Image (cartoon, rainbow, N blue to C red):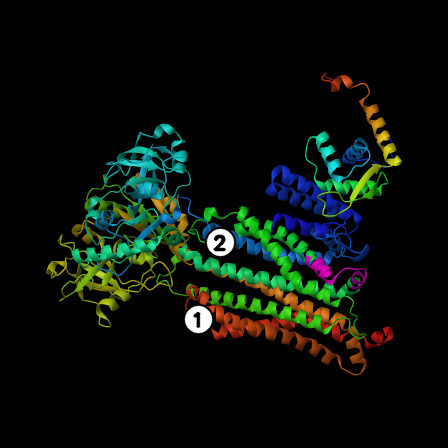
Amino acid sequence: MTSRSLAERILDRALPDGPSGHAIRGDLRQEHARRVRESGDRAAARWYLRQALSIWFFASRDGVVGRRWRSGRLVSDTRSSGGGVVADVREGVSVLRRAPAYSTGVVLTLGVAMAATVSVFAVVRGVLLRDLPYPEPHELVRFDAARDDGGYANGGLDYPVVLDWREGLETVPSVAAYQGSDGVYVADGVAEVWQGTAAEPSFLEVVGVAPFLGSAYGPGEGGIGDQSIFLSHSLWERRFAGDPGIVGQSITFYEAPWVVRGVLPPDFAYPGTRLDYLIPLRDTQWLEGRGTGVLRVIGRLGDGVSLDAAREELGALSTALEREYPGEIRTVLLRGVQQVETEPVRPMLWVFMGAVGFFLLVACANVSGLALARTEARRQELSVRLSLGASRARLARQVVSESATLALAGGLVGTLGAFWGIRGLLTLAPADLPLREGVRMDPLVLLFAFVLAVGTGVLFGALPGVRSARIAGVRLTATRSESRGAREAKRSLASAQIALAVVLLSGAVLLTRSFAALNSVPTGFTEPGRVLMVEMGLGRADYPTGDEVLSFHRALVEGSSALPGVVAAGLSTHLPFSTSGVQASVVRDGEVYRRGEAPLLGLEVVNGEYRSALGLPLLRGREPAIDPATDDPVREVMINEAGARLLWGDDDPLGQRFSFDLEAGEVPSPESFYTVVGLVPDVSDGALDLDVRPRAYYFMPDFLQQYSWITGRFFYLVLRTEGDPYALVDPLRDVVQRLDPNAPLRTVSSLEEMVRRTTMPARFRTVTLSVFALLAVVVALLGVYGVMAYGVATSVRDIGIRMALGAPASQVRRGVLNQAIRVVAVGGLVGLAGATLLGPVIRSMLFRVSPRDPVTFAGVFLLAVIGALGAAYIPALRASRIDPIEVLRQE
Amino acid sequence: MGGRSGLGEFEQLVLLAVVRLGAGAFGPDIATELEASVGRGVTRGALYSTLNRLEEKALLRWEAAGPGADRGGHIRRLFSVTPEGLQALRDRRAALLTMWDGIEGVLDGGSS
C-alpha cells in the first residue's frame, strides 16, 4: 500500500461525507499537486499522509470520526460518544468507574497473574536470553572431558592436549587453559583467603577483556610459574583502597612475593561468580603428564567458523592423537560457553515460564467469565445503542476496549508487583544460579509486560465482545434472565480453568513428592546437625615436609578436642557431601593393571578420630592401626560398601588386598598392596540423588610417608559437638591462631547445612511451582463459585417455581452440587490428559517418582472434586433457601 | 477583558488570516498565509478543525465555489469573517493593547 492510498483510506474514515469533507479533500489534492511540482512525488506523498493523519487525529478528538453520509443523509453513526480507539478507551474508563467491584476484581486477578508472569520472564530474560558480557560471546567455546576414563580422572583436561590443540586446531585459533586456585594473602598480621583463577597468558585475550589498570601479557610473559598477579576490581577497592599505585608493587601471596601486574575490569568474574585474582598457571608437576585432568579450557572460534566445523576438526585431531598416545586421550565435548553456563537451569526456567503461562490463562478465563456475566447484565443498554445506530462491530469493539483498559491497569499492577516477584524468585533461587546479576526489570521486560497486558485484554475480551454483538436487540424469554448460550459459555470457561489448574497442581504434587523422597534419602551420617566442617590450608614455606604437617595436624586435633562440647575431632583430605576428591585406578591381588579397564576407587586420606567425628559407624572390622614399635607403614584401609561391592562383589572384603598408583602393564610389587581392615557404610557424595562412589579411607601418617602428591596441607577439620556446631567457631579460631596465625579458617559450615544446600535446586523448583499451582487452583475454584452463584442468582424464578411445585430443598441443593461436579469432572479429566502429555517435560526434575504417577493424578482429581463441592456449597445452600412464595408473589 | 466568545490564540490567527486574504480565502491560501506569518508549519488537521469550530461559533462563514484545477472535481469553500467575528477580533485587540500599554519600552529591548 502506498502512502497516498493509505492517506485516502484514512481520509475516508475521518472526513464527513458532506460538502465540507469534499472541500477539504479538494484542498489537499490541490496542495499535493503543487508539492509534486516543487518537491517531487515522494515528498508530496509523505506530506499528504501526514496531513491525513493530522485530520484523523483532530476529527477523533472532536468526535467527528465515524459518521457515514450518503447522498447528503446520515446513514450510520458509529460514534456513540466519540469515535476511534482513543475515544473508546476514554469511554471504557468512565463505564468501568461505574462498576468498581467488577473492575477491581478483574484488575487484581490479572495483576497477580501478570506479576507472576513478568517476574518469571525477567529471570528467563536475564539468565537465558541475555548474552554474556563479553565481545562476540557466541564465539566463546568450552572444552570439557567426558568422564569415562582411567587415571586420576576428575572431568578436566591435560596440559599436553591443550598444547596439541593450540598447534593443530585451525577452527579455534585462540585457546586458554585455566584452573581454580586459592591462596592466602598476608599483610599486617592478617591472613585472608582469596579465590581466583590460574590461567595461561592468553586467557584475558580469549575472553575478550582488557585490564582496567595495567597491561595484558605480551609475548613471552605470564608463563608457567611467573609470579605476577592481576587483582579483581572489588578486591582492589576493598583491600588496597583503589590506589592505582599498587600496580608494579609487590605483595605477599601464596607465601611469596608477587608483582601486581594490573587490575581487572569491574564485575569481571569468569568463570564462576567469584574472582579475587588472576595468576599464571603454577605447578608443573600436575601439568606435565597426560591423564591428570586438572585443567579447564576455553577458546574462541575463528572468524565465521561454526561450532559444528570446530567439532569436526576436533574429532579428527583427537583421532590422530589417540593413535599417537593410545588410552590417554579422552572424549572431549565442545560447547558454546553461553550454553554450558545456562544448561543446568534451562529446563527448569522454561517449565516455570510454561507454568506461569498456564496460570495467566486461568486468570484470563476467570475474568472472561466475569466479563460475560457483565455483558449479559448490560443486554438492555446494548440493545438501546444498537437502535441508535451503533453497529454490532462497534459494540463488540467497545467491550474489547473495556477489557483492554482493565488489562492495561492489571498490567500496571502486575509490573509493580513484579519488582517484588523478581526479588522473591532470586531469594529462593540457589546461590549458583548463573548470570543472576543480569536479572532485573529492563526495557525488554517492560515491553513484554505491555504486550502481555494488551494481549490479555484482547484474549479475555474476545468472548464477551462477540457475545455483546450477538445479544444486542435479542429479547430473553420470560422465565430466564440468563440465556442457555451464556450459561454454557461460562461453564466451559470454568471447566477450562479447572483443567489448567489441574495440570499445574499435578506437576506441583509430583515435584513435592520428589522433594520429600530426596530429603528422606539417608545421608549415611548420624546427626549431621552436630558436625562442624572447617576447610583449612597450610603454607608450603612453613610446612615443607610431611613431618611438620603431621605435627600441626596432631596439635590441631588435640587443641580442638579440648574445646568444651567437642566429642570427637578428625581430619580428611576430602569434603564429604561434595564431588571434590581424587579417584585412582586400582588392581586387585593377582591382577595386572590395564589402563582404561581398571576399576576406579575414590581416595580419602584421614587422620585422628575422623570416623567418629563424622558419625560413620564401623560396620565390621576395625580402623587402621599405627604400629608404635616400627616406623614401617601399616598399609591398612577402611572401605565403604560401594567400594567393597565394586571390587569383590558379595565376598567378604576384610582381609582383601589391592594396589594403585601404577604404570600400564605393570604387576604391582608386594610392598604396594593395601589390606582392607574395616567396612563403613556408604556416604552421600554431593547430591542425594546421585549414586554413592566407591571409596577407601587411607590413614594419613602412612600416606604422607609414601606419596608426595597428597601433602596434607589442604584438609578439612571435622568436629562433632554436643550442642550447636557454630558455637565452636570463635573458640576454634583462637586455637588455630595460637598454633599458626598464618593458617586462617577458610570455609566453615555444619554438615547439615551442606546437605541442605544440595537440595536447594529441588526446593526452588518445588516451592515456585507449588505457589503458581496454588494460586491457579484458588482462582479456578473462585471461577467455579462464580459460575454457580451467578447461575443460581439468575435462575431464582425457575427454582422458586420448581419448589412451589413440590421439589424438596435437598433436591435443589443436590442439583447445584451436581452441576458443579460436572463442570469440574470435565475440566479435571481434560487436565489429567494434559498432565499425562506434559509429564515427561519434568521427568528430569523428579526423583523416584514417575511423571505419570497414577496415585498423584487420582489424588489431584479427588482434590479438584472436593474443592468444587466446597466452592459450590454456598450457592447450593442459597438455592435451597429460595422462598417459593416470595417468587410467586413477584410474578 | 472583552469577547463574548473566548478566542484561542490559533483561532485568532486563523480569523486574521481570513481578514487579510479578503474575498476568496480558501483552505490552501489560509494555510500559506498562516505559515508565512507564524513562521512554522500548520497541520491541516488543526486548521480545518479550527475553521469548523469558528463556523460553529458563528465567527466565520463559507460559500461553495466551483472546483478549479487539480482538485479532482471537489468544490471549494470560500471563507469570510462574519460581523460577530470582526467584533471578536476588535475585542481581543482592545484587550491586548490595554495590556501592552506602558511597556513598549520593555518590548523594544529595555529592561523592566
Pick out the residue farthest to the front: B69
Give neighbour class at mark 2: few <14, some 14-19, many 20+ (Cα, 10 Å).
many
| Image spot of residue A692 (x, y percent) | 32, 63
The answer to if A654 sits in the magenta stretch is no
Query: Which residue is label 2 attached to?
Result: A124
Q: Identify the mark nearer the N-term, 2 or 1.
A: 2
Judging depth in this view, the residue of A69 and B74 nearest the camera is B74
Judging depth in this view, the residue of A261 and A590 nearest the camera is A261
| Image spot of residue A200 (x, y percent) | 27, 42
Please indicate whether residue A144 sits to the left or right of residue A629 in the image. right
Give neighbour class at mark 1: few <14, some 14-19, many 20+ (Cα, 10 Å).
some
Say which of marks 2 and 1 sits in front. Answer: 2
In magenta, the rendered stretch is A383-400
Q: Quadrant of the C terminus of chain A?
A: bottom right
Determine whether A505 is above or below A755 in the image: below
Element carrying mark 2: helix
Please tell me the numbered disc located at residue A211: none
Q: Quadrant for residue A802, please give it.
A: bottom right
Determine whether A715 is above or below A852 in the image: above
Q: Chain of mark 2?
A: A
Determine whether A378 is above or below A293 in the image: below
Q: CA distance from mark 2 to mark 1?
A: 27 Å
How many labels were placed on the picture? 2
Residue type pointed to by label 2 = Val
The answer to if A390 sits in the magenta stretch is yes
Q: Quadrant for residue A30, please give it.
A: top right
Judging depth in this view, the residue of A670 and A624 nearest the camera is A670
Please indicate whether residue B9 sits to the left or right of residue A432 in the image. right
| Image spot of residue A29 (x, y percent) | 70, 44
Query: Which residue is label 1 attached to?
Result: A850
Element carrying mark 1: loop
